[in-house]
Image: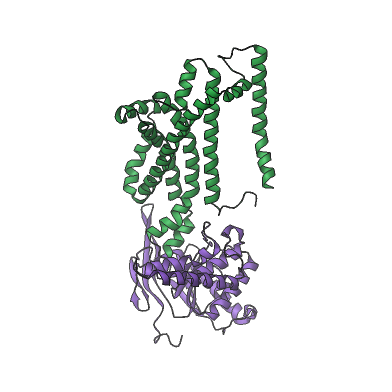
Amino acid sequence: MMNELDVMPKLDVQGICKSFERDRTQHEILKNLSLSVLPGEFVSIIGPSGSGKSTLLQLIGGLHQPDGGSIRMDGADVTGRKGLISYMPQQPALFPWYTLEQNVLLALDITESNAKPRGSGARPSRAASREERRELAKSWLARAGLGGYEDAYPHVLSGGMQQRASFLRAMLSPQELICLDEPFGALDALTRLQMQQWLLSLWEEHRRSVLLVTHSIEEAIYLSDRIYVLSNAPAQTIAEFEVPFPRPRLESILDSETFMRMKRDIYQLLQSAGGMHV
Amino acid sequence: MRKKSWFQLGWPPVAVLLSFLVIWQCAVSIGHIEEWLLPSPLRILETFTLPEVYNRLWMHAMATVRITTLGLAAGIGLGVVLAVLLHLVPFLKRGVYPLLILTQNVPVVTTGPLLVIWLGYGISPKVVLIMLVCFFPIVVSTLTGLTQPDAQYMNYLQMIGATKRQILWKLELPNALPYLFSGMKLAASYSVITAVTAEWLGAKDGLGIYIKLSGNGFMTARVFAAIVVIVAFSLILFGIFSLLERFAIRWKPKKGA
């Protein structure tokens, strides 16, 4: 990153430590871990399973307080504060009692009602924004190939369709930073590749800051601008890779020599870090 | 498709019931059993057509319906409110919930007379008794639904910074709804049985009193007629809750789909 010193990072995690007590012993999960995401940047975290990636996301989400270190967003210390990120979990987690439209607007509704003090906002403007939201949901669902499913309940959708809706829910939420927690881990290989292409095309059009946690080296290289490699627990960042491919990314890069070399390098790093299951 | 499966589900119990009634009818006619001992099914059916029976039966049934619906509604209301309260205040739950289970060991036949001593002979002791019996299954089922939503939804809502209030309205309460309906169906059956027992213990009118008076007079056919009414009432209540459930929980995947 040539501008790294000039640009204020969207997310700046500095020297985070976290341990949990289990069976009366302290387990160190994260040890002096640092990483950053620049505005509009797509950053991936890859690490052995059980390396504390979920814990890291929970700290960024403000669910726990770190034992040491700080989390900054746009320069301000937000350690332990909730509601500042948009989130897509591993399972789609679409609420069975809401229609697809309600599901897709859920994060937006929750964030907005928490952002403004209760009682403010005159009724007519709220009604208007309700109409606008419906339109917003409708147009995005159509773009995700889910047109006509606005009033359907999630159980009628396939796994890939549910994941697309789950991603839309994160996209429509107003926060600038989106955290994706192994979003395609449960999908079959073909659906997974289609989802990656779909996500890439959407993201390249509407740049947001993205932090992606993944198991898949290919996925990390194909999608990201930068990749952090984590060590086994207690997790630290042991390497950082810049991905040199231009955008928009083409599928053909998957067969290029640079891609293969990078994949091999990361794989060897993970193996020496221990615990990479293949 | 749906009609067919209803029929397929429906015919075995209907066939068993019909053959039971036929055997009963034959046993009474062939064995020359006295009517005061055991009336035949046809005789019971005939009893309904007697004006002095169905007028009085209707009057008593309405009295039972009144205290049952009042007690059931109060029990459901109290149960849901208490469940939400216990759920929101963990200390209260730890303190109250075990005692709640203990209270269920006190038999209705002892609570009934006590309530009469405290509340007099009106309908209030009976309504209160039904309420006390109904609210327990409601509290237990609702509390189960409130405390056991799938972890993935809870994790998601916490990650996006939802407040406790939002978690309650958007996750815990909708999740508790199917549990609440199971509880309400149970409570519906309990409420009718309790109403009849309460009337038996002391009342001016109601099916419990009608059964008691008819029994005392050895008018056994009337006792059975009242039992038929009680069963029908229970079934109607159960049916109402099933319909409400289907209307309220439209998101459930249809069976076999």
**B213 left or right of A19 in image:** right
Q: Is residue B138 above or below residue B194?
A: below
Residue B13 sits in quarter: top right
Label tally: 0
Position of A231 relative to B75 (above/below): below
Q: Which color has been applied to chain A in this rendered view?
A: purple
| Residue B166 seen by the camera | yes
Question: Between residues B30 and A147, which one lies in front from this camera angle?
Answer: B30
Q: Is residue A256 left or right of residue B77?
A: right
Picture coordinates of residue A84 (x, y %)? 40, 70
Q: Which hue is chain B drawn in?
A: green
In the rendered image, residue B185, in percent from the top left (x then y), is placed at 50, 40
Q: Residue furthest left?
A: B118
In this rendering, is residue A125 above or below B247?
A: below
> Quarter-wise, where is residue A223 in the image?
bottom right
**Where does residue B93 sit, x and y in percent of width and height?**
35, 45
Q: Nearer the viewer, residue A68 or B21?
A: B21
The residue lying at 56 percent from left, 20 percent from top is B221
Image quadrant assignment for residue A264: bottom right
Residue at position x 47%, y 30% in the image? B193
Front position in the image: B188 or B61: B61
Residue A230 in view in this figure: no
* Left or right of B198, for residue A207: right
